[in-house]
Amino acid sequence: MGALDLAGIESAARARVPRDIWDFIEGGSGAERTLAANRKIFERFALRPRVLVDVSTCELGQTLLGTRLDTPIGIAPMAYHRLVDEEGETATAQGAGRAGALFVTSMFASRTLEDIAKAGGPRWLHLYWLRDRAALAALVERAEAAGFGALVLTVDAPRIGRRLRDQRNGFAVPPHIHAVNLDADLMATSHRSEKGSSGIAEHAREQFDTTLTWADLGWLRARTRLPLVLKGILTAEDARLAVEHGVDAVVVSNHGGRQLDGAIPSLAALPEVVEAVPAELPVLFDGGVRSGTEAAIALALGARAVLVGRPVLWGLAVGGADGVHQVLDLIRDELDHTMALLGRPRLADLDRGAVTDWPCPT
Ligand code: FNR
């Protein structure tokens, strides 16, 4: 029998993945307060079921920025999937494709964009803004040619958060795993391992453009016809600026608690961002979602789609493409079940009326 919830897949993955890689995946920054709060905050919400509604079929499909999706649960961008599976992102793309789920591929993918595209499935490409704009422009061009449907620029990482687990472990990307979509020269520091520092953080210090401001977005815009999504928006102020700068969608995210420790939990930021933008601008959400019930809460608070991070790597570690498919389907099935018992069989029915405060101390 397959796992009945994600906890089973998580413990199977933990048993397989080497300790320093597990710490890299699971860890957050600083005292990991934001990491913990991303999970805890879901307990603050209760669902308000309606009855005597025809729930014979629930509709979970939608078109998002021109990309057709069978499920509102997608995969958040995560670097180096080959850390947990030899096939890496090609397996992830296969699993996502079978689930009809969005795969936001990291710029630091360990398989080529072209191989990922061959595996099929709906895909967008994530970017960090590198100092080397020529490398950035080349990647954008390749993404367009390989059928990636949107660009997701992550804006919460001018530096990499202080991830103490990685610093203690002297974590670096193992020498046989590469960010193959970028030049080896550009990536050299990410492989340098030293106790007390992290190769990933060193690399970002060297390559990320910390001077980036709103005014620079036009440069990227001018180089692509793809929709532009900003990931890492946590305030109404920045959501309004994103709209003013013509962004096509935003992702409410604190990077899974890996960047600014003490930052507002993702779910707490979602309502103010949703309120600040026009109703037609898609707001996506990530951070701490571990079940269909939690996905339903985020959708009810205004998210158009929910991205999931770490659980996808658990699935990949345990079962390759099948494992990724299993994780996505499990959350989707739980969501389908939740929508039926909530009496809200369409995504559009999941509105603020579907949630209320949890009425007693948890
Ligand atoms: C990430 N995340 C991330 N985000 C991003 O914008 N670019 C990246 O390259 C990465 N890489 C990455 C690696 C690993 C191992 C993890 C766990 C996360 C953050 C990711 O996109 C997402 O915001 C969070 O993971 C969502 O939280 P959950 O679902 O993991 O709790």
Image (cartoon, rainbow, N blue to C red):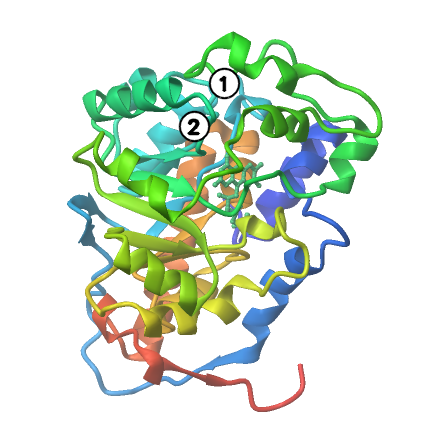
Task: Tell which of 351 and 141 is nearer to you.
Answer: 141
**Measuring 38% from the left and 18% from the top, which residue is drawn there?**
135
Mark 1 secondary-structure assignment: loop
Residue 224, quarter of picture: top left
Q: Which residue is mark 2?
A: 107
Label 2, ligand 1: CB separation under 8 Å: yes
Residue 179's label in the rendered image is: 1
State the image coordinates of residue 142 (x, y, percent, origin top left): 27, 19
> Percent x, y for residue 322?
42, 32
Q: Nearer the viewer, residue 172 or 59?
A: 172
Q: Compared with residue 232, is residue 55 higher up or lower down, i.e. above or below?
A: below
Amino acid type, label 2: Met
Location of residue 278 in the rendering, given as x and y in whole percent from the top left corner: 23, 68
Mark 2 nearby-residue class (10 Å; few <14, some 14–19, many ≥20): many
Q: Alpha-carbon neighbours of circle 1 within 10 Å: few (<14), some, or many (≥20)?
A: many
Q: Is residue 63 above or below residue 150?
A: below
